[in-house]
Image: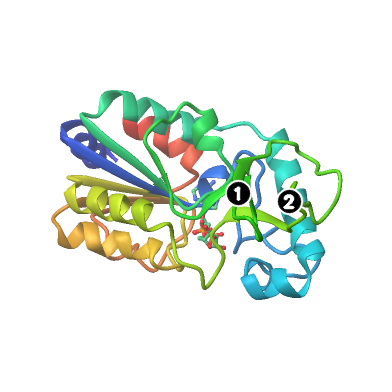
Amino acid sequence: MQQAREWIQSAASVAVLTGAGISAESGIPTFRGPGGVWRSFRPEELATPQAFARDPKLVWEWYDWRRGLIAEAQPNAGHHALAELEARAARFTLITQNVDGLHDRAGSRNILKLHGDIWNVRCQSCGRERRDLRPKLPELPPRCDCGGLLRPGVVWFGEALPPEVWERAEAAAGAAEVLLVAGTSAVVYPAAGLVPYARQAGAKVIEVNVDETAFSHLVDCSLRGPAGQILPRLIS
Ligand code: APR
């Protein structure tokens, strides 16, 4: 832990990659851990354009349930530690796979949302995207003023990441002296690819996870434990 703290303190540029695990201590179930299944469906069965085309109401029931859960949740010490680190590091980029908006609420600023934002909705017909912060939507599936079907403003399996966001994430990972990877199983690409990419570019990679991941043996330092406990100690 001490070595990891020193790497972070002396780094001129820090990049962070977070996943669902950083929101676990806020009460939001992760995708592949206990609680990741909703009404016997796995995320891979619901977070796809095909599932939405087949049954938009069912997919929206899942997102509406998640939006309700997130609206009740608070950022935890892990989110706040990253906002604190951003205030101190010379160059800092927070790259997140999460769509819950808890990093924003913790005060993080330079956030790259690889998989979009659950609080955005986009019309399938006119393409208009807007924020909708209502924790419970009055009708499912919701409709646009134009009459078209609204979809969650998130990236589904099989869909491309927002190109500009991805380019900035690659640039940040490629330029980072330290990449801190917290709360991700690192099984979903291209996001997971940022870890070997940063390492090949010369970054020291520090992992924070309660379990071992596919990258645990690859990183320079793998810290085992909850992000809400480890991150505050890592940046103090
Ligand atoms: N602190 C740190 N890590 C934790 C904690 C915690 N308190 N709780 C769980 N974890 C770890 C788990 O061990 C696991 O490695 O967080 C990781 C969560 O993994 P996933 O559920 O697969 O979530 P994530 O890696 O974000 O998934 C990536 O998959 O479903 C898609 O688009 C979705 O963005 C998501 C992507």
Q: Is residue 94 left or right of residue 118?
A: left
The answer to whether residue 213 is visible is yes
The answer to whether residue 223 is visible is no
Q: Which residue is mark 1?
A: 128
Q: Quadrant of the C terminus?
A: top left
Q: Nearer the viewer, residue 222 or 125?
A: 125
Q: Residues within 10 Å of mark 1 (few under 14, many from 20)?
A: few
Q: Which residue is mark 2?
A: 146
Residue 65 locus on image (x, y percent) = 77, 50
The amino acid marked with disc number 2 is Cys
> Relative to 56, is 174 above or below?
above
The amino acid marked with disc number 1 is Arg
Which label's residue is closer to the chain start, 2 or 1?
1
**Rendered image coloring scheme:** rainbow
Q: Quadrant of the N terminus?
A: top left
* Residue drawn at x 30%, y 60% as measured from the top left: 195
Quadrant of the image occupied by residue 102: top right
Q: Are marks 2 and 1 in contact (CB under 8 Å)?
A: yes
Q: Is residue 22 left or right of residue 49?
A: left
Residue 218 locus on image (x, y percent) = 27, 64
Most distant residue in the right direction: 139
* Residue drawn at x 51%, y 45% as measured from the top left: 22
* Residue drawn at x 72%, y 53% as measured from the top left: 63
Q: Is residue 31 left or right of residue 12?
A: right
Whole-angstrom CA distance, mark 2 to mark 1, is 10 Å
* Residue drawn at x 61%, y 60% as measured from the top left: 31
Quadrant of the image occupied by residue 160: bottom left
* Distance from mark 1 CB to nearest ligand 1 atom below 8 Å: no
